[in-house]
Image (tube, rainbow, N blue to C red):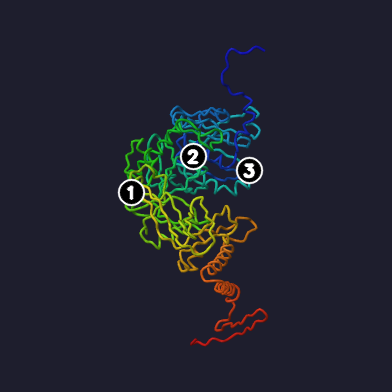
């Protein structure tokens, strides 16, 4: 066999014999395709009816549109038969009726152009066999009606599926004479921009997922990854309603996703521009610096982002505990603080709260704001450590420095802050307590070294709070107790440890006993009574006493 000199694209006639495998033929697909055909034909409405003919239930889909002039286009895969104007505006593929492939179908139509009605019956096997199908003249109103047998499963879901197909359709759809609910696809949009044959709806704080429908093609909704723009306190997304944009196309034959082409890329660019212009109209923003620069490149001039940052709260060892952020309304006197880990931050926050000079002034650093003049001018705590004097030696706790000093009182304990910015400085602040704990090296919080400026520098309750934030992290092992159970046990052990360190062994023993009795015993003391117990190693004396109203 010699090689051909040229080749050209073609569709093998054998493709028709596989047409039933090109379409899902679900009720939803059928209704969507036929409603779209009715809309293109200029119908004023679509009527869906369940009718009985010769003991068989049929679903009839009827419209009052232009009708079909040439019956041969029904089974001509890829030949739509639409006029030049419809072909230009919508790029129809000539596949819609093939959503019925493999089913027994009766079609009646009367074109307005000729007034000559006709009907055909397509048996289930005719879609692929290529057998001739008789065309008979008939009397029929202008428009087209398609009947297909409807089984019990279709009948059960018809109302729900018909409502879904009609919801965002631009023309009315009726089921057994009742109008189905229709809704504007862009309902709830904060603003709507109409351009280039589409309506762009901009939404504030709309949760946009890549698999969520975002584009409406005259009633057929599909998912497409559209741009979003995030501020620190708002999130912007878009939905698209197609009006007249033939370059925006659906992947055939399923029509479940967008064709990735230049028109779709241009639409995405238009969405970003529309979002930035909407933000511009609002007057202020909290965009990341990179987004602010992008808006400027698109000739959308915005002021710098508002000078607002999240107030700083010390990190906690367990991410499930939360951190309780709050907004700061002004950056005039703020100081940024970098990340130093839960043990250092918990104890630093405690020392700073006692000192007071940075009350309400510390803010979390936010790298997305780097570039704004107001942000770049802010001073920043770039290093945080504790200096300890003990036994004539000065040691440092911070970063990778773990001095390993045994728990107890030291001679000097200072929080040392290194602050960069317009006026760099190193600041020493007396610290009541410091906790040396590294969860990568230590097995449990009992191994933590707790350093105190004085025996009374911190209360047991305050130390328990610090240990909780610095050390507690619930196990995520499937066999582990619940978070609450693990946390309760941690607090019980931490209370005993803190009491022993600060008040001695006897106080710790009493605290442990008090906690056990409160957890295990106190709840079943009868109302109006109290338990009195004398507990020894060899015996216990227990009794119940009535409590008078006056006591």
State the quadrant of the N terminus.
top right
Q: In 3D space, how far apart are the residues under numbered discs 2 and 1 (Cα atoms)?
A: 47 Å
The mark total stands at 3
Element type at mark 3: loop
Disc on the earlier residue, 1 or 3: 3
Q: Is residue 19 above or below residue 395?
A: above
Give the labeled residue for mark 2: 225
Residue 109 seen anywhere in this rendered image of the structure: yes
Q: Residue at x 42, y 43 (%)?
A: 229
How far from the left and from the top, in percent, is residue 289?
38, 42
Q: Residue at x 48, y 55 (%)?
A: 395
Give the labeled residue for mark 3: 54
Element type at mark 1: loop
Q: Is residue 265 left or right of residue 333?
A: right
Q: Is residue 367 above or below residue 69?
A: below
Disc on the earlier residue, 3 or 2: 3
Element type at mark 2: loop
């Amino acid at each position: 066999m010699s090689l051909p000199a040229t080749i050209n694209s073609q569709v093998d006639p054998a493709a028709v014999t596989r047409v039933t495998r090109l379409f899902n033929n679900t009720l939803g697909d059928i209704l969507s395709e036929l409603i779209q055909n009715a809309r293109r034909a200029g119908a004023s409405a679509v009527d869906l009816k369940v009718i009985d003919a010769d003991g068989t239930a049929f679903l009839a889909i009827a419209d009052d549109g232009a009708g079909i002039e040439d019956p041969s286009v029904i089974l001509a895969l890829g030949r739509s038969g639409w006029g030049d104007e419809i072909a230009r505006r919508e790029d129809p593929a000539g596949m819609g009726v093939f959503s019925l492939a493999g089913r027994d179908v009766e079609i009646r139509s009367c074109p307005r152009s000729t007034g000559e009605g006709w009907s055909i019956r397509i048996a289930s096997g005719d879609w692929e066999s290529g057998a001739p199908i008789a065309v008979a003249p008939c009397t029929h109103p202008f428009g087209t009606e398609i009947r297909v047998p409807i089984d019990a499963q279709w009948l059960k879901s018809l109302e729900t599926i018909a409502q879904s197909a009609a919801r965002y359709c631009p023309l009315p759809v009726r089921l057994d004479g009742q109008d189905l609910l229709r809704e504007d696809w862009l309902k709830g949009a904060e603003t709507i921009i109409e351009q280039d044959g589409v309506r762009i709806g901009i939404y504030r704080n709309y949760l946009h997922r890549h698999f969520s429908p975002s584009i409406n093609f005259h009633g057929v909704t599909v998912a497409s990854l559209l741009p979003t723009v995030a501020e620190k306190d708002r999130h912007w997304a878009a939905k698209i309603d197609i009006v007249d944009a033939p370059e925006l196309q659906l992947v055939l034959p399923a029509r479940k996703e967008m064709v990735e082409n230049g028109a779709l890329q241009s639409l995405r660019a238009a969405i970003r521009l529309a979002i930035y212009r909407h933000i511009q109209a609002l007057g202020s923003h909290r965009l990341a610096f990179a987004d602010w620069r992008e808006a400027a490149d698109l000739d959308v001039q915005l002021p710098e982002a508002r000078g607002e940052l999240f107030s700083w709260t010390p990190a906690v060892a367990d991410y499930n505990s939360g951190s309780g952020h709050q907004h700061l309304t002004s950056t005039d006197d703020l100081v940024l603080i970098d990340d130093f880990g839960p043990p250092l931050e918990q104890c630093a926050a405690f020392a700073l709260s006692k000192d007071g000079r940075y009350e309400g002034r510390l803010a979390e650093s936010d790298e997305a704001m780097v570039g704004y003049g107001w942000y770049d001018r802010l001073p920043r705590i770039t290093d945080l450590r504790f200096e300890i004097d003990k036994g004539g030696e000065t040691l440092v706790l911070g970063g990778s420095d773990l001095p390993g000093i045994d728990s107890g009182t030291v001679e000097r304990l200072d929080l040392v802050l290194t602050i960069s910015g317009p006026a760099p400085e190193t600041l020493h602040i007396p610290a009541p307590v410091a906790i040396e704990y590294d969860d990568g090296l230590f097995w449990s919080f009992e191994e933590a070294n707790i350093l105190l400026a004085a025996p009374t520098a911190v209360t047991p309750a305050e130390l328990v709070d610090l240990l909780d934030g610095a050390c507690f992290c619930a196990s995520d092992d499937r066999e582990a107790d619940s978070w609450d159970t693990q946390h309760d046990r941690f607090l019980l052990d931490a209370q005993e440890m803190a009491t022993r360190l600060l008040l001695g062994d006897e106080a710790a023993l009493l605290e442990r006993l008090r906690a056990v009795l409160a957890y295990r015993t106190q709840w079943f003391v009868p109302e109006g009574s109290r338990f009195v117990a004398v507990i020894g190693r060899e015996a216990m004396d227990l009794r119940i006493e009535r409590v008078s109203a006056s006591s």
